[in-house]
Amino acid sequence: MDTNSNTPSNFIRNIIDEDLASGKHQAIVTRFPPEPNGYLHIGHAKSICLNFGIARDYKGTCHLRFDDTNPEKEETEYIESIMRDVHWLGFDWDQHLYYASDYFEQLYNFAVELIKQGKAYVCELSAEEIRQYRGTLTEPGKDSPYRNRSVEENLDLFERMKQGEFEEGSHVLRAKIDMAAANIVMRDPTLYRIRKVDHHRTGDAWCIYPMYDFTHCLSDAIESITHSICTLEFENNRALYEWILEQVFPEPHPRQIEFARLNLSYTMMSKRKLLELVNEGIVSGWDDPRMPTLSGLRRRGYTPAAIRDFCDRIGVSKANSMVDYAFLEHCLREDLNQTSPRTMGVLRPLKVVIENYPEGQVEYLEGVNNPQDPDAGTRQIPFAREIYIEEEDFMMDPPKKFFRLAPGREVRLRFAYFITCTDVIKDEEGNIVEIRATYDPETKGGSAPDGRKVKATLHWVAAEHSLPAEVRIYDHLFKVENPSVGELEDNLNPNSLEILTGARVELNLKNAKPEDKFQFERQGYFCVDQDSTPEKLVFNQTVPLRDTWSKVKIK
RNA sequence: UGGGGGAUCGUCUAAUGGCAGGACGGGUGACUCUGACUCAUCUAGUCUAGGUUCGAAUCCUAGUCCCCCAGCCA
């Protein structure tokens, strides 16, 4: 693993410290147990970093276990994407890859054991009837008429359920606990249901499938998990988790600990709704760069290191919270700033003709690849009479704090020369179409021998000696901070994608490959999209640079 | 109106009876061949009301507000 361990402590690590100190455990075993019914998202990353991070720091083990007990929703495609994403994030389960479906036989035997103890029974109430018998939050439930069948009858019926003798929905296996329990989870929960559906791994071997509550605790126990870390909504289920293990599994038992799942402003983690975005074509797929999925973030240009750092720094607690998206971006920029080679890309080009620069001449100027990293070296950047600068770097009538190019003003072209705007050419509608300028040959490389200063440095590319590119600019997919309230479509940001087709980038980007990352100086971080070809480069804006000027501008 | 959880700067998170600290965000400066980065500095918090204590975010009592649970989903 290439992960560094500077993870701050948290209440879960405190529990583990205590368990180690007291001698309750000698080694720690955790697990990440996704259901393969969707793609992993940034919320899963928090759980992955937590579980694998603990295993790494305590020299323990973390298992990857697919919780694949519902054949109707689960697919092999998801299994593959999940494994790819966990690896991409920088974690490795080594030989510890498991499937709950591998335990189906054992689980079945545990169910039989429970029946033999008189603690489970086959119930023939319909789903609707079971719901009615369950009672409500304030009223106790009532016993199923099938609750007091003999052990022999239950054994026989359960066996026949397994043999496929009964129709879906006609029979279930239920734990016999307490229909009056204040915790509704304990009101004779369903343990097995009949589903005459092929399972993506076990095929048609089974037509009864265990429920989550029955499967999860036993899977944990079978794997000798010491700390079973899950999210807050399973707090009520902990009683059942412990109950089942107490009936059929020898000590020691894994301990379930719940933490608050990640909520990120302007994004949504609900797998159901993410699926909807994909299915409705609102996004281009699970890996749309606006998606909070790991594959989306990867395509957008996020780095595993930044995501890990983020997950470590947001902390772990039991309080529901909403992390500011800006914090994720902060962690991202911190990483990208250190690691991204710089280049120049002009998103919205404005032509500048340098009148005193010889026609047809091309010279190569040296640019630093990464001021944060001297080892990154330098590159040669072609310069010529006609160049492009950023449209927003010129103003006809600049306000006081605008330092960039304006009529009569001198600025620096990064790594190149000082130029002075001498004229502005407009079309019939008054739109600025071209800038005329002169350069000072004495300022080659970007500094003046006479020591005079300029207030601004602009990025640029040579008109001929640059490459056309498409640049995709992204904003939050949702326009509201918490899109999980209200209707999905009402919360969508109509401007979450802007495609710039006329961008120009440095010639040096000719051989850039998908996922290559760059800082376009003064703009932001960009990465090559998978749609990119040598003939037509396509970049995604990963995140813009912090921009104090835009704040000044607003005032 | 049952049960299970939770509440600390705008946000996230520490402090485990002993200086309420850090990070993000925001403000102001400095620096700058990226209005970036970096640096300095400021901003701002213990849900409420009582109590115990030399001392309470922490313990006690009573409230308030928020989240989760009535799938044959996980």
Image (cartoon, helix red, strand yellow):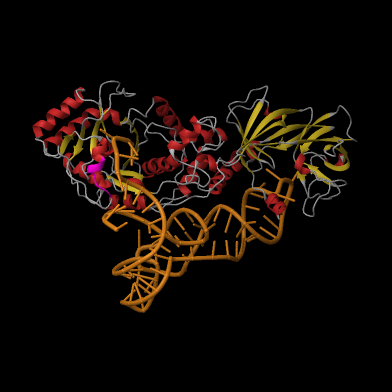
Q: A390 or A279, which is in the foreground?
A: A279
Q: Is residue A340 left or right of residue A34?
A: right
Quadrant assignment, res A199: top left
Q: For the point 22% across and 43% down, which residue is it? A: A133
Q: For the point 26% across and 37% down, which residue is it? A: A128
Give how far across and how far down residue A25 sits, in percent. Answer: 26, 46
Give how far across and how far down residue A512 sits, in percent. Answer: 63, 27
Q: Magenta segment: does it hold A135?
A: yes
Q: Is residue A535 above or below residue A328?
A: above
Q: Is residue A181 above or below residue A37?
A: below
Q: Is residue A316 left or right of residue A474?
A: left
Give how far across and how far down residue A504 sits, in percent. Answer: 73, 31
Q: A518 or B62, which is in the foreground?
A: B62
Give how far across and how far down residue A509 sits, in percent. Answer: 68, 29
Q: A350 or A282, which is in the foreground?
A: A282
Q: Magenta segment: does it hold A435?
A: no
Q: Is residue A64 left or right of residue A315?
A: left
Q: Is residue A494 visible?
A: yes
Q: Is residue A253 visible?
A: no
Q: Quadrant of the C terminus of chain A?
A: bottom right
Q: Is residue A256 above or below residue A123?
A: below
Query: What is the span of residues highlighted in magenta in the rendered image?
Result: A131-136
> Given the current orientation, which residue lies at the most extreme top position?
A204
Q: Quadrant of the N terminus of chain A?
A: top left
